[in-house]
Amino acid sequence: MSSEVLPKLSALLQTRTIGFPDFFSIIEISLSAAVTPCFISVKKIITSENFETEVKNSDKPVLLDLWAEWCGPCKMLSPVISEIAEEYEGRLKVGKINVDEQQQLAAMFGVESIPLVLLIKDGKTVDSSVGYRPKEQIKAFVDKNI
């Protein structure tokens, strides 16, 4: 849990009784702590509105993670993508495309299976990887293409 979550949770738990609204606060705090770290270092959520600026016209290679909320392997891959974003900061732009919300982009890339990781360089897809891959394989995928 993040350092800001623990004091809030501790303050709620130190009271003698926890009321119904406090119970929901604990759940909200716990959920935000559980979800936030997976996305914290991914710089951009890519949409059809920002695709041209963030991906097609990027001055750096772009690693795109195409995913969906219901996809188990996508959820497993998300922390790996976040770690890659941190490690390659300044050399690689990293973004996520939710294929359910961005169906036009999913169709443009011809998505048939997810998770799909694409490496875009000079506005063109130079490589792709389908399915969950461990961090070392994703790093090798990035290294051979940037």
Image (tube, rainbow, N blue to C red):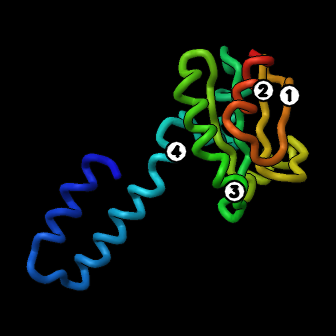
Q: In the rendered image, which residue does mark 1 sit on?
A: 127
Mark nearer the N terminus (1 vs 2): 1
Q: Looking at the image, which is closer to me, 47 or 16? A: 16
Identify the amino acid type marked 3. Glu
Q: Are marks 4 and 2 in contact (CB under 8 Å)?
A: no
- Provide residue 9's location: percent of width, then percent of height: 23, 63
Task: Determine contact: label 1, label 2, CB under 8 Å.
Answer: yes
Residue plotted at (20% across, 60% down) = 8
Q: Tell me if 111 is positioned left or right of 115 in this view.
A: right
Does label 1 or label 4 sit earlier along the sequence?
4
Foreground label between 3 and 2: 2
Q: Residues within 10 Å of mark 4 (few under 14, many from 20)?
A: some
What's the amino acid at mark 1? Asp
Residue identifier under label 2 = 141
| Image quadrant assignment for residue 27 | bottom left
Q: In the rendered view, would you say 141 is above or below 133?
A: above
Residue under the image location 29 percent in, 70 percent down: 26
Task: Give the residue number, with chain letter if any, for mark 3.
Answer: 101
Mark before the other along the chain sequence, 4 or 2: 4
